[in-house]
Image (tube, helix red, strand yellow):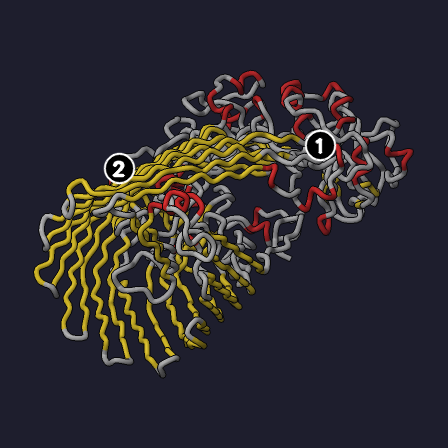
Amino acid sequence: MANGLTTVHNNYILDGIDNNNDTVDFLNGAAYANLPPPDAIQEFKVQTSNFSAEFGRAGGAVVNAAVKSGTNNFHGSAWEFLRNDLFDATALDQWFTPADQKEKGELRRNQFGVAAGGPIIKNKLFIFGDYEGTRIRQGVEKNPSVPTSAEAASGFLDYRDRFASTTSTSTDLLGRSFNNATVFDPATTRPVTSGQADPTTGLTATATGFVRDPFYTGGSIAGMTDFTTAAQQNLMNQLPSTRIDPNALALLQLYPAAGITDISSPKYFVNNYFVNRSQPDDNNHFDVRADENFSERDQLFGRVSYSRRHANFPGDFTGLGDNTGFAGGDFTDRSMNIAVSETHAFSSTLINEARFGYSRLRTASVPPSSLVNDVPAQFGIQGIPQTDGNGGLPTIGIRGLTSLGAGAFASPNRRSSDTIQFTENLTKVHGGHSFKGGFEYQRLHFPWIDPAWSRGEFDFGGYTGMAPGVGGASTDGAGAADILLTPTAATVANGINNVGGANTVFASNITQPDDLRHYWGAYFQDDWKASSKLTLNMGLRWEIFGGLGEGSGKQAGLTLPKGGSPEYLILSQQKSAPLSPAFAPLLQADGIGLTYLNSSSIFTTPLTNFAPRVGLAYQLSSKLVARAAYGIFYGGFENLGGAPDPGYDYPFTVNLSFSAPNGNILPVTYPNGQSATLENGLSAANPDPASPNFSPNGLSLVGFQRPWKTAYTQEWNGSVQYQLSDSQTITVAYTGNNTHHLLNGEKRNIPNLILPPGTDKTPYLPFPDFGENSDYLTSSGAAYYNGLQITFERRFKQGLNVLVNYTRSECKDDFKNILGISENQFNRAPTLAGFGITRDYTFCGNDVPNIFHASGVWQLPIGRDKALGKGMSGALDAFVGGWSAQWIVTSQDGFPFTVKSGANGCPV
């Protein structure tokens, strides 16, 4: 983070060559691609404010590093860093953990390497190389929620222990009181009318809505209104074995036995399984650089960097239960960076530099279950394609329990990127001026494959709760009961048939977008020493961030123009792509036009990104210097992530979502009329766009703002530095910025975040025939940052240095970064027609108001020519001398978070 801006606004450069991670959603966990070891770095600089016009693609920081070169003397170093759990203290949260659950996780970390350089031909040809290896074995504590010991012992038929989880009660529309852990029978779902008697119970409804009856073994419930007594609860929450789905039962049996059997324990119901798993993580990295002096006027260098990481991120469960999640399982990350640079001096005042670079990154994650085919058939689940990497279970989400299956976006999961770069810089020194100008071109190519729900996702957790009534009265039911109960015909008068099963279903096909984009930059910089006391820095940069394209023109998306009608755009290169006959009529029914766009990208390319920058430094006295600067900075390339990619939209990619209407009262129904059950799987959802039976109902439409704007940041700062003494300086600085046109993720078709719980959302859906889980991206986000920064530095004698700094700052924004880096997480439903609600303006997710750092280095006075050991031999000095001690102290505020409603996820 740099002055309030997130990592997607940084530009990482290695030897003048692009070192950014341009893959979709940073699967390797970092915004950069290659990380040389510290002993291989010749120069490292982080520029966070008013950097030269030479650098672009960054509104945050420019992180610039250069690898060492060989010299006329051979030099080298070797290192080993060891960390072990034997040296680690017990974590604070473990102090209060029961002894039988307390376990310090394994940690074995070895980081070792060697670096060396020297001449091949003295004064002419030099070489430098380094290698670093990292071996990590770390224990990872897993605390998933599994069925309770009592539920498992009953064959998952008895849920009476749930009554111990809460004393809260709710009242339904017939005036009946229930403990909130009551399990209701979905087959008894029926409408009631205010003021009229319910034929099943004889009770009069207090309002119009729906009711359900509890599972009750004590006979007739006619006339009963109080179900909260212990005697009544002893006759409730028991499922009839004749209603149990054997496939669902087999899935529940994949859960391990709960580790907590004491019902009085706070972890009896939640996080009741404990296990430590080993997480191996190995990395190998090397750099090789060669420099040649052809003459006094011409120098050439070339460098190759390569790293390969192999790790395994285990899930909560072993076997078919899996639950590794996104980027889990077997993980590989391979990166290469190549730089070639030629410098030619036309004269002592005119120097030209030309550079070529190539950066490559390959990442992949493979959950263990994804390699096992024919698993769904073992549980009666149909319609999941058994292709390479798409094995294992679908995601099975069960309310109150940790999900089974690898999860959404988990597999097949592969990313790659190839960036080619050309850079030209020309420097001219004239009088007090140092002029520098040049241009830069990058071609970024990053194909990827990561379907959202190619194995499907089935969420169970709504139908065994009380049917919502006036004011949203409801109970929790039991998620395990939801999956177990087979939807059946109603068992009461006026009942609704086939209520039950999954209350949300997701399905996708498998595609591979072939994304690419281009970047151009040109600049002119004048660093002018106007006098002995005044230095001016003036520059102008012009940048073109090419719109995201796709190799075959496979892009489509919804756009909502201001003052115009919604349009669904498909690039004209794919005009022959087949569309479902029902697609255009559905668009028309929802007021959306269909247009074929004659362009290479759904996104527009702004051509007026001019970025002026000016700075000054003035020496007020021999001990006091003042500095000030202002500039505009465009970029960087904000990472869209996978799901909102325009190559990830219909008719190329199909993402279907089906949700229970009317607050989990009516069942999820597929376009072919079937109810959503575990067994019909994806066969009834049919996410294959080429199928003649494909229905676009429930299709998630990715949307994009047009015209698109490039994010830019206005930055300003001022500082004074005072020399207190020959060894002490203090700097007081103010820095501020405001950023516009940030990438913002919205949900334009999901009104339940702002509706009272239990409200029928159908009348409020802008596009009722399409999926609610539809992303809409805009370049409308805004943020600001203001910070006071104080730095004190003192250089002592005998090699002791101290650095202390303090920052007081505030950062606010109103955008939701698509990768979840901001605190604003699709909250509410901005710009939803009829509500007039805009985005929430709140503290940035990375806002830390107070930060204090103190650090020091002490060169120990031991060795030759030191206080201790002045007469030491050179051989002994090589081992005993040259040691230093370092310390760092950091104290800071925590990060902000939003308290959200448990009913609909809306901020409160």
How would you rate the neighbour count of disc 1 (Cα within 10 Å): few for under 14, some for 14-19, many for 20 or more? many
Residue lying at 40% horizontally and 72% vertically, measured from the top left? 717
- Left or right of 335? Residue 888 is right
The disc at residue 552 is 2
**Vertical comparison of 150 with 342: above or below:** above
- Element at badge 1? helix
- Left or right of 834? Residue 598 is left
How would you rate the neighbour count of disc 2 (Cα within 10 Å): few for under 14, some for 14-19, many for 20 or more? some
- Left or right of 150? Residue 94 is left
Q: Quadrant of residue 258?
A: top right
**Sequence-wise first label, 2 or 1:** 1
**Vertical comparison of 457 with 881: above or below:** above
The disc at residue 304 is none
Q: Is residue 434 visible?
A: yes
Residue 37 coordinates in the image, percent (x, y): 38, 44
Q: Furthest residue to the right?
A: 231
Q: Furthest residue to the bottom?
A: 621
Residue lying at 52% horizontally and 21% vertically, measured from the top left? 382
Whole-angstrom CA distance, mark 2 to mark 1, is 48 Å
**Residue highlighted by disc 1:** 186
- Between 136 and 769, the residue placed more toward the observer is 136
- The quarter of the image holding the C terminus is bottom right
